[in-house]
């Protein structure tokens, strides 16, 4: 088991956003968390990554086990340094005034004292470019001049550059035209297949998420409503009615 979330409760001030959710992710899996606006999807990812942001929720109960050990007391930067996880946040957090290549290079594990860091960075950079040829074509262009979809790819590319073998994505399909969206998911699936990178993807677009992931959980107002294989969820009448348009 790579990740085990146990009865996790989180709050913003005195508003509880997650009322004790539990789920697991095995190494090498692609798992999705689907749910409507405000269900608690972003809160879940922010709690796992625990980025030191003012808008991040506070964990008030439960536990998060990574490889069987609680990471509740682990400093967030250690999670990144040890390449335990990387988050592609909601919206696109890239540096607009830096080129595509610079955006990717500075995301490469900053703390590694590898003698051959340049070689390692070069290898991952090559992998990112082969996954997203569009980023290679635009490598000298400033981030802010990329299209929304290209920026989304760059955000994913930056997460890959950390060298982490577990990547969490918050609504990567948001704002992407279908063609780019499928390109993105194809790239992610390839990454999972070839590099065995474990993926947790949060989506409002349940149809696409269930096509992409092998397993999923449905989050409803801060609780896990149901979970199962993607096929089971897609066939579940309640899930169909609420999230798949019939
Ligand atoms: N910074 C914050 N301060 C206070 N409440 C918040 C904050 N962020 C989120 N919430 C509340 O927590 C609940 C869960 O929000 P969250 O952002 O996790 O939902 P979501 O599933 O990601 O929704 P969306 O699909 O709209 O992104 C909501 O009721 C939301 O209003
Ligand atoms: Mg969200």
Image (cartoon, rainbow, N blue to C red):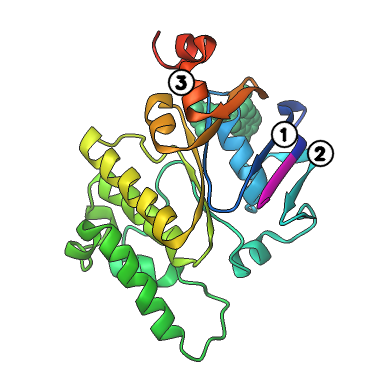
Q: From the viewer's perspective, is residue 74 above or below residue 235?
A: below
Q: Secondary structure at mark 2?
A: strand
In the image, the residue with mark 2 has its CB under 8 Å from the nearest atom of ligand 1? no
Q: Nearer the viewer, mark 1 or mark 2?
A: 1
Mark toward the start of the polypeptide (1 vs 3):
1
Q: From the viewer's perspective, is residue 106 above or below residue 55?
A: below
Mark toward the start of the polypeptide (3 vs 2):
2
Q: Secondary structure at mark 3?
A: helix
Q: CA distance from mark 3 to mark 2?
A: 29 Å
Mark 1: few/some/many CA within 10 Å (<14, 14-19, 20+): some
| Total marks placed | 3
Span highlighted in magenta in the image: 1-5
Which of the 4 image quadrants contains residue 96? Answer: bottom left
Q: Which residue reaches farthest right?
A: 61
Marks 1 and 3 in Cβ contact (< 8 Å) = no
* In front of the other: 245 or 12: 245
Residue at numbered disc 2: 62
Q: CA distance from mark 1 to mark 2?
A: 9 Å
Marks 1 and 2 in Cβ contact (< 8 Å) = yes
> Is residue 4 on the magenta stretch?
yes
Residue at numbered disc 3: 234
Q: Which quadrant does the C terminus fall into?
A: top left
Residue at numbered disc 1: 22
The residue positioned 53% from the left and 61% from the top of the image is 165
Q: Secondary structure at mark 1?
A: strand
């Amino acid at each position: 088991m790579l990740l085990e979330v146990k009865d996790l409760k989180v709050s913003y001030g005195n508003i509880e956003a997650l009322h004790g959710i539990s789920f697991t992710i095995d190494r090498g899996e692609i798992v999705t968390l689907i749910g409507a606006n405000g269900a608690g999807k972003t809160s879940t990812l922010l709690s796992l990554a625990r980025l030191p942001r003012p808008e991040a929720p506070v964990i008030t109960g439960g536990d998060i086990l990574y490889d069987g050990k609680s990471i509740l007391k682990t400093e967030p930067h250690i999670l990144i340094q040890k390449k335990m996880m990387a988050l592609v946040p909601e919206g696109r957090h890239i540096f607009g005034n830096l080129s595509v290549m610079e955006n990717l290079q500075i995301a490469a594990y900053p703390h590694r004292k590898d003698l051959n860091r340049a070689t390692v960075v070069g290898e991952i950079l090559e992998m990112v470019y082969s996954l997203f040829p569009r980023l290679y074509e635009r490598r000298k262009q400033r981030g802010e001049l990329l299209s929304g979809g290209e920026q989304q790819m760059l955000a994913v590319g930056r997460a890959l550059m950390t060298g982490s073998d577990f990547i969490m994505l918050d609504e990567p399909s948001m704002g992407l035209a279908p063609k780019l969206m499928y390109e993105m998911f194809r790239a992610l699936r390839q990454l999972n297949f070839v590099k065995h990178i474990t993926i947790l993807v949060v989506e409002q677009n349940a149809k696409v998420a269930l096509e992409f992931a092998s397993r999923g959980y449905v989050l409803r107002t801060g609780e896990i409503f149901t979970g199962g294989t993607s096929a089971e969820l897609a066939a579940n009448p309640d899930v169909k009615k609420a999230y798949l348009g019939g």
